[in-house]
Image (cartoon, rainbow, N blue to C red):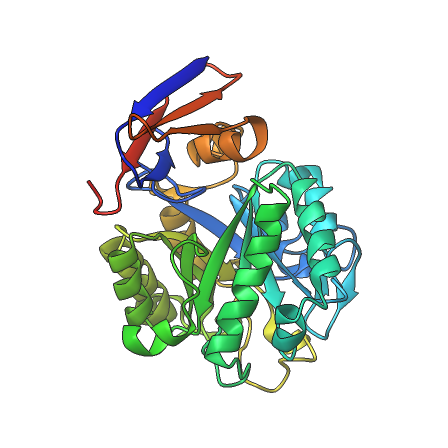
């Protein structure tokens, strides 16, 4: 198809969208949310021993997304297996496993003590390697850049964090990457005004996120509504040992309030990542009282969990997943990767001519707005 427009705007902004009403990359339709499991190979399962007793080994269906981690500049845990005392991590192991063919990948990018090096450009080559790996995966990859940015344990200076976040995204854009989305994730605490100190700007953030242990992400939800961005609960787990808890009690105290919170805020909360792991077996967390959060170790919790997570609200893995979240035919994806967009000014007539061609069929909706939003 060939499209041509004449616009009588001296200054304008193009806002591309598909005809589905979605406002962010990989955002599910209204009334739906993506279910994600994490956060190491043993927790998600489906691998050789000792990583063969995880979520997918015990529960059907396979979730729509799985989480992993890496760090600049070494990118440990990306292309090969690594372990930092909290389970084996290997993003490539996930994408090469046929169990996870129809899943999105969520990567936590650790940036502690790296911000200055990123901003100065010293890690540009490593960012490019990371970006090329993402491009090669052929699936949506959501990146939690400097997750829990407001946590005092990370000590991210706000202005430096924002510059590092933007430099990473700018490098990705220079590479014409189209299968990624960014997540700006807080610890779940803090007011909107406090959190906005670290906000890189709406042009750099696709999703907002927060950690839900005992926090409700109130500040993040407020920002999400004002910025018209979807929210991912990017980390969630009860600090309880489900093996030794009364199922009804722990469900009513933690799980039911979590799901009530999601349903009550489903205008913005569009994804949940649950951490399913025996924390006490991992050296990093041993002795901290996190317990065992694997839902199948408690029969009552498991029964209620399956009733919830298999409801129509939740998106799990399926052949239609990528179409459902508009990955395969996202117009932004097409524009960034497959077309030559030409804008020709005509100063005599005070207008612009925009031309592009799309080698695909289907409806295309293009919103064109001036700087006043008209």
User: At which x and y percent is residue 289?
Assistant: 54, 84
In the displayed structure image, the side of residue 138 where residue 184 appears, left or right: left
Which quarter shows the C terminus? top left
Front residue of this view, candidates 187 and 33:
187
Residue under the point 48% across and 74% down: 149
Front residue of this view, candidates 186 and 129:
129
Q: Is residue 90 above or below residue 6?
A: below
User: At which x and y percent is residue 303?
Assistant: 41, 53
Q: Is residue 49 above or below residue 284?
A: above
Front residue of this view, candidates 28 and 38:
28
Residue under the point 45% across and 49% down: 35
Q: Decide if residue 58 is in sight here.
A: no
Residue under the point 54% across and 76% down: 291
User: At which x and y percent is residue 63?
Assistant: 52, 45
User: At which x and y percent is residue 169?
Assistant: 55, 55
In the displayed structure image, the side of residue 130 where residue 299 appears, left or right: left
Q: Decide if residue 200 is in sight here.
A: yes
């Amino acid at each position: 198809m060939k499209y041509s427009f004449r616009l009588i705007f001296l200054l304008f902004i193009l806002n591309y969208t598909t005809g589905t009403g979605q406002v962010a990359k990989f955002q599910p339709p209204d009334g739906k949310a993506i279910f994600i499991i994490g956060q190491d190979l043993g927790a998600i399962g489906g691998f050789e021993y000792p990583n063969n007793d995880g979520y997918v080994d015990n529960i059907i269906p396979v979730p729509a997304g799985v989480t992993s981690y890496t760090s600049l500049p070494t990118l440990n845990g990306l292309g090969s297996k690594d372990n930092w005392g909290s389970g084996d991590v290997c993003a490539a192991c996930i994408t090469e496993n046929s169990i996870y063919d129809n899943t999105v990948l969520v990567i936590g990018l650790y940036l502690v003590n790296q911000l200055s090096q990123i901003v100065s450009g010293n890690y540009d080559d490593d960012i490019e390697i990371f970006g090329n790996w993402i491009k090669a995966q052929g699936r949506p990859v959501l990146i939690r850049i400097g997750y829990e940015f407001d946590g005092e344990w990370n000590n991210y200076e706000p202005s430096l964090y924002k510059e590092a976040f933007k430099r990473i995204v700018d490098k990705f854009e220079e590479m014409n990457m189209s299968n990624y989305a960014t997540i700006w994730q807080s610890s779940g605490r803090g007011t909107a005004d406090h959190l906005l100190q670290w906000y890189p700007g709406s042009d750099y953030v696709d999703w907002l996120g927060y950690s839900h242990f005992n926090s409700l992400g109130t500040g993040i939800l407020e920002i999400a509504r004002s910025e018209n961005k979807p929210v991912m609960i990017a980390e969630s787990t009860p600090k309880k040992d489900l093996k030794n808890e009364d199922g009804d009690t722990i469900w009513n105290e933690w799980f039911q309030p979590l799901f009530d919170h999601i349903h009550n805020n489903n205008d913005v909360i569009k994804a949940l990542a649950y951490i399913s792991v025996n924390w006490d077996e991992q050296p990093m967390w041993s002795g901290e009282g996190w317990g065992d959060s694997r839902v199948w170790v408690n029969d009552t919790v498991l029964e209620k969990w399956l009733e919830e997570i298999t409801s129509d609200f939740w998106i799990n893995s399926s052949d239609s997943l990528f179409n459902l979240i508009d990955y395969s035919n996202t117009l932004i994806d097409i524009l960034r990767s497959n077309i030559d967009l030409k804008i020709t000014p005509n100063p005599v007539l005070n207008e612009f001519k925009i031309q592009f061609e799309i080698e695909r069929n289907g409806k295309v909706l293009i919103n064109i707005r001036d700087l006043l939003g008209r």
